[in-house]
Amino acid sequence: MSQPLPSRFLGAIGGFVLDVLARLGTVTRSFLQLTAKLPGALRRPSLISEQVHFIGNYSLLIILISGLFVGMVLALQGYYTLSQFGASENLGQLVALSLLRELGPVVTALLFAGRAGTSLTAEIGLMKAGEQLAAMEMMAVNPIQRVLAPRFWGGLISMPILATAFSAIGIIGGYLVGVQLIGVDEGAFWSQMQANIDVRRDVLNGVLKSFIFGIAVTFTALFQGYESQPTPEGVSRATTRTVVVASLMVLGLDFIMTALMFTK
Amino acid sequence: MHRKSIDVWVGLFVLLGIVALLFLALKAGNMSSVSFAKTYSITGKFDNIGGLKRQSPVKAAGVVVGRVGDISFDNTTFQAIVRLDMDEGHKFPKDSSLKILTSGLLGEQYVGIEAGGDDKNLVQGDRITHTQSAAVLEDLINQFIYSKAAEGKDANK
Amino acid sequence: MSNLVEIRDLHFSYGDRPILANLSMDFPRGKLIAVMGGSGSGKTTVLRLIGGQLRPQQGTVTVGGENVHQLDTEGLYRLRRKMGMLFQFGALFTDLTVFENVAFPLREHTDLPEELIRDLVLMRLNAVGLRNAHALKTNEISGGMARRVALARAVALDPQLIMYDEPFAGLDPISMGVTANLIRNLTDALGSTAILVSHDVQETFHIADYVYFMSAGKVVAAGTPDELRQSTHPYVKQFVNAEPDGPVPFHYPGKSLAEDFGLEGVQ
C-alpha cells in the first residue's frame, strides 16, 4: 500500500466530511435559489392553482381514507388501554390529542412524500431527461421560476389542508368506533376532548408542523428531480431517494418541533 | 377549457381545509381559551399556589367565570401574586374570598371564588385579601401522621 | 460585423476529461453553417457553449459582438431571446398542446394579445406544415411531427441565430427531406444565421453553405460541401464516403487478434 493505514483512514473520513459539507452547501444554495423565485411565481396564480389541484386534490383520497382508519384504530387501541385505568371516558381526548399533535401532521407528511413527492420527482426528472428544462433555459425562461416554484407553492398550500383534513376525519373515525361501536358515552367523548384540547397549543401547533413538513417534503421532491441523472435509472433512484430523505426529515423535524412546542 | 374545472376543484379543496380547521377548533378544541370577551383583572396573594397554572379556570359554584392570567412572586412578602382575568359579565362583592382547590382527588387545580356580602363590587385592579392557599399533599400527610401519633400518645397516657 | 458568432481559442473540459482544445470557428451572418463529426467529437458541446449553458475553461465565444460568458444572468437571458434552439428530439413541453408549445415563447416574452398570438402561432405552424395539428397533444404526434413543432417553436420570436442539434436523428427519409428543406427555407426567409450540428452527410451537404469537420475536439477540415466531397484528408474521406475503417478504427484498441487467440508463432 502506498500510505500507512491510519492516514488513509483519516483521509477517507476527511473526504467524507468534506463531501457531506459540500452536499449541505449545495442543498442550501438550491433552497435559497428556489425561495428567491417564490414571489415571482405568485404572478402566475393559474400555474399555482393547477399545481394545488395535481398535488392536493389527487392526494385527498388516500389521506382521507388513511385518516379515517388511523382514527378508528386509535379508538380501538385506546379504549382497551384506558379501561384498565378506568379512564375510558377520556377516549375522545386521547384520539384528538394523538391526531392533532402528532399523527395528523406526521402521517400525512409521510403519505404525501410517498404519493405527491414521488410524482413531483418523477415529473421533474423526466422533464430534465427530455431536455425540456434545458429548452426552457435556452428560451430565456427560468425553469426554477416557471416549473419548480409553482409546484413548491402547491405543496406548501396543500400539506396543511391535507393534515387538517386527516386529523378531522380521524376524530370522526374515532367517534364512530368509540361511541357508536364500543359504546363510550357520547357526551363524555366530546366534552373531555374539548376540555383538554387547547386551540392554540394543539390545533395550531399541528398546523404549523404540517406547514414545516410541507416545506421539507416538497423541496426534497423538487430538488431530487432537478438533480436527477437524465436516464430511467436516474429518475427511479431519485424517486426512491425522495421518499427516504423526505420521510427521515419529517421524523427528525417532528422530534425537534415536538421538543420545542410541547415541553416547557 | 378545463381551467375552469380545475379552479372549482381547488376551491373545493381549500374549502375542505377551512371546514376541517373550523371543526377542529370548535368541536374538538376549547375555543373559550381564544375568547375575546372583555375581562377585568383582580389580584390575590397566596402563601402557596400549589399546581395552579396560567389559564387555569376561576370557578364560582363550579362554573367557570374567569381564567388565571399572570403568576408572579412578591420579593418583600414572599408570597405568590396571582392575577385573575374575570369575565365582565360576572361581578363579585369586594369582600369575596379565594381558595385554591383541586378538581377531583388528583386533578387539575383551579381558583374558587366565593362571594362575600359587600354592596360594592370588585373592579379592575382590586386586591382580594381573603385567600386560602393550596393544600399541599405532603403537609396533609404529615398532619395526618402527627394527629395519629398524638392520638396514640393520648391513648397510652 | 460579418460574423454573428465567433469562437476563439476555446478550451473546454468536463471534469478532467478534455472535450474541446484550442477551437476557433467563424459563423458569418445569414449563412447556414454545419458542424459535423462522429459521436463524441464535441459538436453538441460547441452549441451548448454558444448558448451559454456551459462555461469554457479558456477562450471566448462572442455572439453579435458580446462575450457570452461575461454576461450576467439578465444579459444572458436577453441574448437568448435572440436565439432559437432545436433540441435533438424536440424537447416539447409534454403537458402542453402543439399550439401552446409554439405559443410559449410568445406568451413569456411578449405582451401581445391572445388574438395576435394565435395568428403568429398558426403562421409558424403553417410554415412547417402543421397548422391543422395545432390542437393535438404531444403524445398524439409522431417523432417527425414533434421535430417540426419544435422547429416552429424555435423560430417563434424570429431569432437572429438558430441552432439545430442533430435535427435529422431518427427520421425516415421523407421527414428528413422535409426537415432539411424547412431549415434551408426558414434560414433564407428570416435572414437568420443557422448552425447545424449533424452527422448526416447527405442532407447536410445538400443545404449547408459551409461545413466544419470536427474530430476529438478539434477542427480537422473546413470548407464548402463541394470542396469537402473532394477532400483528400483521410478523416473527411472516411466520413463523407462512409468507409468502415480509416482514421476512426473499426477495432476497439487493445490486444491484437494473434495475442488473444494464441496464434503467435503460427505461420
Image: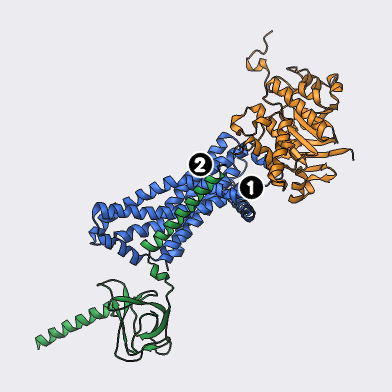
Chain colours: A blue, B green, C orange
* Residue located at (16% from left, 82% from top): B148
Label at residue C157:
none
Give whichever of B145, A137 is nearer the camera: A137
Residue type for callout 2 = Thr
Residue C209 in sight here: yes
Q: Is residue A191 left or right of residue A263?
A: left
Residue C115 appears left or right of C62? left
How dense is the environment of label 2, judged by Cα within 10 Å: few (below 14), some, or many (20 and up)?
Answer: some
- What is the crowding at mark 1: few (fewer than 14 residues within 10 Å), some, or many (at least 20)? some
Amino acid type of disc 1?
A: Arg
Q: Position of residue C209 (x, y in %)?
A: 84, 27
In space, the residues marked 1 and 2 are separated at their CA atoms by: 25 Å
At mark 2, the secondary structure is: helix
- The answer, for residue A245, to whether it is visible in the render is no
Point out which mark residue A240 bears. 2
Residue at x 82%, y 42% (from the top left corner)? C63
* Residue depicted at x 28% and y 52%: A177
Q: How many marks?
A: 2
**Image x and y of residue C116, in percent:** 72, 42
Q: Is residue C37 above or below residue B90?
A: above
Relative to C51, residue C264 above or below: above
Residue with the mark numbered 1 = A146
State the image coordinates of residue B25 (x, y, percent, origin top left): 40, 62
